[in-house]
Amino acid sequence: MRLGREKTEVEATIDMTPMIDVVFLLIIFFVTVTELTRIELIADIELPEADQANPEERTEKTRMVINMKKDGTIDIGHYIYQVHSPELKALLMKEARKRVEPDGFSAQQVVIRADKDMLFKYAQSLILDCQEAKIYKVLLQTRLPKELRQP
């Protein structure tokens, strides 16, 4: 005679709901990041070459990327502006006010990605617009010549 409790088998199950939630969040994250990167890097802009070009360092957490096409039009995200337009100046002023330092200048960083065939007067006008908005961290993005690039 056997005394004791009879053992019953318990079937183990795994709740898949949290894992599915995490997968969907990852998909949303990567789609968003891909879209933001695409906005910054417009395919029809060929950057000028510079022998002393440094790899891009994102020193600022927030930066404003301005793409300038051959004809001098400015592409910021999905919006097109002309140099010295009131809308562009208002946008620069708005961005500058987001991060004002004690000296009155803005800590906002502006990266200008200009096409190599564009006239410099357009970039110069944009730099002057940044100066009016008290933005002094203005970078001109370039790339290394093919013979200096590492494979």
Image (tube, grey):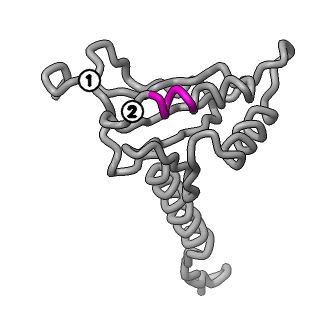
Label 2 sits on residue: 119
Pick the residue in front: 117 or 51. 117
Label 1 sits on residue: 144
Residue 97 lies, with reference to residue 25, above or below; the image says: above
Which residue is at 56% across, 78% downward? 13
Which residue is at 16% across, 27% downward? 146
Pick the residue in front: 88 or 111. 88
Q: Which residues are magenta?
A: 121-125
Within 10 Å of disc 2 (Cα), the crowding (few <14, some 14-19, many 20+) is some
Which residue is at 55% across, 82% downward? 11
* Residue 148 in picture, x, y percent from top left: 18, 19
State which mark lies toward you, 1 or 2: 2
- The mark that comes first in sequence, 1 or 2, is 2
Residue 103 in the figure: left or right of residue 5: right
Residue 129 lies, with reference to residue 81, above or below; the image says: above
| 42 within the magenta span | no
Q: Secondary structure at mark 2?
A: loop
Residue type indicated by callout 2: Leu
* Residue 17 in picture, x, y percent from top left: 61, 75
| 122 within the magenta span | yes
Residue 138 lies, with reference to residue 46, above or below; the image says: above
Residue extending furthest toward the left? 147
**Based on the displayed image, in which of its 4 quarters is residue 95 positioned?**
top right
Q: Secondary structure at mark 1?
A: loop
Residue 48 in the figure: left or right of residue 33: left
Pick the residue in front: 80 or 78. 80
Residue 139 lies, with reference to residue 10, above or below; the image says: above
Q: CA distance from mark 1 to mark 2?
A: 20 Å
Is the C terminus in the top left, top right, bottom left or bottom right quadrant? top left
